[in-house]
Each structure stands twice: as C-alpha cells, then as structure tokens.
Image (spheres, grey):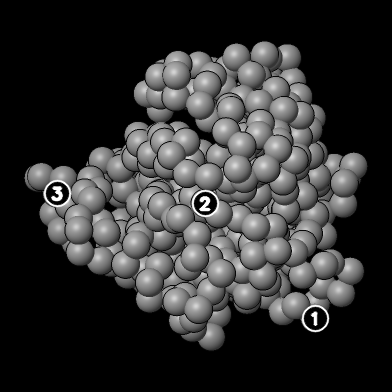
C-alpha cells in the first residue's frame, strides 16, 4: 500500500511538471520553403526565434519532412556544428536576421532532397533554382521533436567563436588575421601557392589585409572559388586593389566539394593555373572550406603526407577560433572535416594509410577530367621556385 501511494505521488508530480510545460514536447511546426539560397540551403518561412519560443533548443534532434521526404537532423547555430556532408537545422538570430536554414554542411540540400535543380545563367547572381515538376509550391515543411538534447554534447563541443574585429586578434599578424599564408608542404615550390580569405569581399573585415598580403607576396594569378565576375566588380574598392591587377578566374562555385558543379569549376581553375604565371592564390570567402579543400588536394598531389595536409588545414581554425593544437576539439574538427572529405573523394578508408599523391592524381583524372599532360603541367607550375618558372 505504501509503495502504491509513492507511485501515485510520483505520477501526480510528473503530471504537474508536464502541465507546467517542464516535460512538454514542443508541438510540430508547419511552414514552407521561402527561398532556396545560393548553395542549395532551404530558408523557411518561420523565424528562428519562433522555433525557440515553441520549445525547441540548440542540440535537439528533430525530424523534418520536406514535401514527402523525411530527414533527421540536429538543431545548431553554425554549419560546422555537424560533419561535412551531414544535415543541420541552423538557427540564425542576429540584429539583421532571424532565419531557419535547412542545409547539408558543404553540400546541396535542395538537390539532394530532389526539391530543385540549379542552372547557371549569364545574369546576376549567376544561377537559377528550378523546382522539380509535380511539387506543390511553396513546398510544405514540417518540423517535430525526435530527441530533446540528443545532440547537446556534440553541439557544445563544436561551438566556435570568431569575430571580424582586428583588435580581437592582437597575437596574429595582419596576414594571419586574413588567413593568408603560403602553402609550403612537401613538393611545393617556395612561395608558389598561397591560400587566403577573400581579398575583395569586405564582409569579414579582412579583405584589405588579404589584399596587402597578396601584393607583398607578388601574386599574379588568382583562383576565386566564391564569386562570379559580376559580383567581383561590385565590391567597393575593387578597381584600386592589388587584386585587380592579377589574372583572375571567378568560378562562383557551390560549397558542395563532392558535387559535379564543383568538379567542373575546379578543373577550370586548374586549367587557368596552367595558362598563367605564378605565384598563385586560391581563395573563397573565409578561405576555410572550399579553399581548404582545393589546397589539400593540391598538397596531396605534390606529395605532402596526411599529417602535413591536416596541419595546414587546421591553421585556419587555430587563427580564426583559437582552437588549440593537440586538443580533443582540434582532432575532432580535423577528422569530421578535411579527413572525412578527402577520404570520400579519394575513395579510401583512412587518408593516413593511403598513397595520397596517387589518389590525388587519380581524382584529378577521374573526377575532374584532366589529362595526364594537364596534371603534369599543374605539378610543374606548383613545383617551380618563382613566378617566372614553369
């Protein structure tokens, strides 16, 4: 009898908690796709603050139904809260934005989900999204709770903070603040290849520093992974920049480095590199993801070991976010990003156990469609010791 009384008391207590909202499961949210962004991310019609007000939280795992397809994904605040190739419901709440974005980190959710196809066009912004036939537009999206806090530990491990204020990085040089550095791993000619954040896009507060570093390094040829030619010309101060005096190919690539569009653009960029004099610069916007991937593939091609490739990639996280070399966070970021991506595109289990030079050469031939002569020409360009040697 006493035991039964205790059980009833516990049940009553739980009912009180649930009635007060402590144990309440958030109601499902129904909305629609308001916009498909440049890289295939889906912008929803409800605000991020509304999702939080409804009882959802960062670190929850949710179930998302888009038209007739269902996906499970965590709620986060940054694309880097998940591995490359993984889905995320990203909540952005700032003075300027209050947005829910469904995305694949370094991928194309609109294409992957069969929602829409991207077509290149001559007019700005250089692309158009066309919804798949048979879909009711606007496309309905439903969000429901799958596991409250189910991703919380991983979410908190991945929280990275970067500012765009130079004064917040007193220990970095101007070039380091701009994420500008020489790619000097094994096989690379000294001062032949550089990587950087954008020297012309001012949104990160780093463009002037990157442009000054570009000029000091004597860069002659630029592979711009992020912008179209039209967008490039519209950046304030572009005409007066050192960047404007370089030979530039503006590829306007997606962030899906494993997609066909990126492969075509990467091949175009390497053919441009062959046709022009070094030193060379490869950049995207942050100089972290697309530029990081391209730099890593070229480092592999030229004979760099896996540890050197990973170490160079992680310098960006050390400088931008203060991630400590040797820490658990450092290792987990590397494994979930560049290690995972290179393994996927090369088709290997572990990049540390692979012949990376051979894998990179086969990737350039198989996926990018470069000929043997073109691959040898890329290697000759990158191994030269100054901008006049080929």
As drawn, 74 above or below 71: below
Residue 36 drawn at (x, y percent): 30, 59
Does 359 sit left or right of 368 as displayed? right
Q: Nearer the viewer, residue 296 or 182?
A: 182
**Which of label 1 and label 2 is nearer to you?**
2
- Neighbours of disc 2 within 10 Å: few (<14), some (14-19), many (20+): many
Label 1 SS: helix
The C terminus - image quarter: top right
Q: Which residue is mark 3?
A: 135
Residue 360 drawn at (x, y percent): 57, 22
Which residue is situated farthest in the bottom direction here? Answer: 95
Residue occupying the point 62% across, 45% down? 387
Residue 310 drawn at (x, y percent): 74, 36
Residue occupying the point 76% across, 29% down? 186
Count of labels in the image: 3
The disc at residue 167 is 1
- Neighbours of disc 3 within 10 Å: few (<14), some (14-19), many (20+): some
Does 283 sit left or right of 141 as displayed? right
């Amino acid at each position: 009898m006493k035991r039964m009384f205790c059980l009833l008391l516990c049940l009553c207590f739980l009912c009180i908690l649930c009635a007060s909202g402590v144990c309440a499961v958030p109601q499902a949210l129904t909305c629609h796709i308001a916009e498909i962004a440049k890289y295939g991310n889906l912008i929803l019609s409800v605000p991020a603050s509304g999702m939080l007000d409804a009882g959802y939280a960062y670190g929850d795992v949710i179930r998302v139904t888009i038209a007739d397809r269902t996906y499970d994904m965590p709620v986060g605040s940054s694309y880097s809260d998940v591995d490359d190739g993984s889905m995320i419901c990203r909540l952005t709440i700032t003075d300027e934005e209050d947005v829910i974005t469904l995305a694949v980190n370094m991928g194309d959710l609109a294409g992957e989900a069969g929602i829409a196809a991207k077509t290149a066009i001559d007019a700005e912004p250089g692309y158009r999204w066309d919804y798949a036939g048979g879909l009711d537009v606007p496309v309905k999206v439903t969000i429901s709770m799958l596991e409250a806090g189910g991703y919380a530990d991983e979410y908190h491990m991945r929280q990275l903070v970067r500012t765009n204020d130079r004064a917040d990085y007193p220990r970095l040089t101007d070039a380091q603040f701009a994420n500008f550095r020489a790619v000097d791993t094994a096989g690379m000619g000294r001062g032949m290849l550089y990587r950087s954040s954008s020297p012309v896009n001012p949104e990160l507060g780093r463009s002037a520093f990157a442009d000054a570093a570009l000029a000091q390094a004597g860069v002659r040829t630029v592979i711009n992974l992020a912008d179209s030619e039209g967008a490039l010309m519209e950046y304030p101060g572009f005409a007066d920049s050192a960047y404007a005096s370089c030979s530039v190919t503006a590829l306007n690539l997606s962030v899906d480095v494993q997609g066909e569009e990126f492969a075509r653009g990467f091949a175009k960029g390497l053919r441009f590199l062959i046709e022009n004099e070094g030193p060379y610069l490869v950049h995207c916007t942050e100089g972290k993801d697309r530029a990081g991937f391209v730099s890593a593939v070229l480092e592999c091609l030229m004979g760099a070991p896996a540890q050197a490739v990973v170490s160079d990639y992680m310098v960006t996280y050390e400088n931008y976010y203060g991630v400590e070399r040797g820490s658990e966070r450092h290792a987990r970021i590397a494994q979930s990003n560049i290690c995972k991506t290179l393994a996927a595109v090369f088709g290997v289990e572990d990049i540390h156990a692979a012949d990376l030079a051979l894998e990179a050469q086969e990737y350039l031939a198989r996926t990018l469609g470069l000929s043997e002569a073109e691959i040898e020409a890329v290697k000759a360009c990158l191994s030269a010791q100054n901008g006049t040697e080929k």
